[in-house]
Amino acid sequence: MSTAFLEISNGVAVPRDKIPHLDFDRFRREALDIVENGGKVVHFFAYQEGDVVKLSAVLRQDHLLTAGCDAPDTYPALSSQCEPFHMFERELAEQFGISPEGHPWLKMVRYHPNYMDRVDVFGNNYDDDIPGNYDYYSVEGPEIHEVAVGPVHAGVIEPGHFRFNCIGERVLNLEIQLGYQHRGIETLIPGAAAKRLPIIIESVAGDTTVGHSLCMAQAMEALSSTQPDQGAHTIRTIALELERLQNHVGDLGALSGDVAFLPPMNYCGRMRGDFLNMSLLLCGNRFSKGLIRPGGVRFTLDDEVRTTLAQRITEITPQVKHVIELLFSTSSVRSRFENCGSVSQEDAEHLGLVGPAGRACGMAYDVRRCFPTEGYGELDIPENAEDSGDVYARAKVRADEVLQSIDLIQSLLTAPVKTECPEPEERAMAPDAFVVTLNEAWRGEVAHCVLTDAAGNLLRYKIKDPSFHNWNGLSMSLRNTGISDFPLNNKSFNLSYCGFDL
């Protein structure tokens, strides 16, 4: 279909004056047409330039599309016609006070004022707003009761509030409210020194250090016309796959523990430590902090480290396969996983689920295959789609990806890896430019969108963690299940609080 939106490439900067600036009605109509015809929303956000607030959208089909417009104070909500815009419009309202009239469920995303310091479109006065002090969704009836959990949890876990509407033990609706770890990262970035930017980005979500750092580095490289060498691409790809292994193996163990099958839980806990120690071998710490920087990487992969890493991967592979077989061949595990917390493909499409959560519902999308960066263009990334959308499918996708990530890393370690580690430097960025970078982190699509002003300074740095899409998937998975299934479903998604809160 023809559209006024501009086709762009992942990680390639374009001059902002090349991006179509439409009147709002046409912008809205074109965006809805793209998404209603199978497209997905990557970004939909606002930024202020001078006295004018502007909207920008990045959508994806087989390719990426973008356009912008001036933001009206109020507008007919896109969500009332097309559900995937739902969360983005709530964020727009919170950050800029732009009111989407007719929005089906307009409430705060993160509680706190980002860009606006006034009574907002939700009717709250931020000076005396109390987190959680708003009207939650409720169901009425003599047999209905509510169960409130959090934000303080019984364990070492991030804060989030979960409110269940139940009839007996059956959950009718789960409302999730986050924002307790809102740090104002997007407002902090434009004023930060260049050398601080990687440190800030590494802290967006600590378990997704590589995923977010990679997007940041690629954006800065595109804006400064910097090209890392092939060795850096290889090391970055290995690091991203190690991060996937660490978290997927940990999740499989946690899921096993949630159904009281302790042997795989203990095995996976130990193996997760082994994979974390591989990152330690690669760059000196277990969470890959300090590894990726604009221009390349800060640590080489010499033959001694490469050989040791290959030996460790070879040694642990049969152990991983054995534990996965043990987990999925145990009937008591299968009976708890199967038909628990199912999300249909139709609902997943409406919610815009990404990553393993989306692939478990039959959506095969994977950034590594669809919009490859680094070394992925030369690698075979299978489609891991399952169709049941339940805990079993979400676990099975993880298990498949664990074995595939091992194969990918082994293929990258067969030949010597040569790279130069450039000294950190402040790189001049192109003025009035725009770039979007996407990568498939272990939870799914991470996307960073960066705009520069006429002086080449950061005008807007927009971050989207996959959890921004997927928290509503968890809510949907609880409908008509027993409330006691919440921990298992929650772990099967294992979403980020801080990555969402930003």
Image: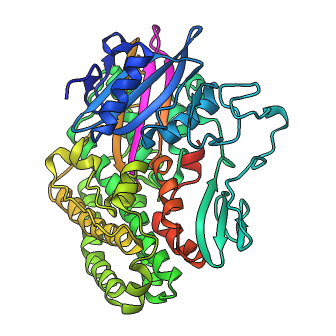
- Which residue is rendered at x = 44% and y = 49% of the image? 466
Residue 59 in magenta?
no
Residue sitting farthest toward the front = 141
Location of residue 200 with respect to 282 vertically, above or below = above
- Residues 314 and 218: in front is 218
Q: 29 above or below 263?
A: above
**Residue at the image position 31 percent from the left and 59 percent from the top:** 359
Q: Position of residue 209 (x, y in %)?
A: 46, 49
Visual colour scheme: rainbow
> Where is 126 relative to 335, above or below?
above
- List x then y, in percent, for residue 77: 51, 31
Residue 57: image location, x then y, percent: 40, 27
Q: Quadrant of residue 6?
A: top left
* Position of residue 182 measured from the top left corner of the image (x, y, whole percent): 65, 43
Segment tinted magenta in the rendering: 444-460
Q: Residue at x 31, y 31 (%)?
A: 33
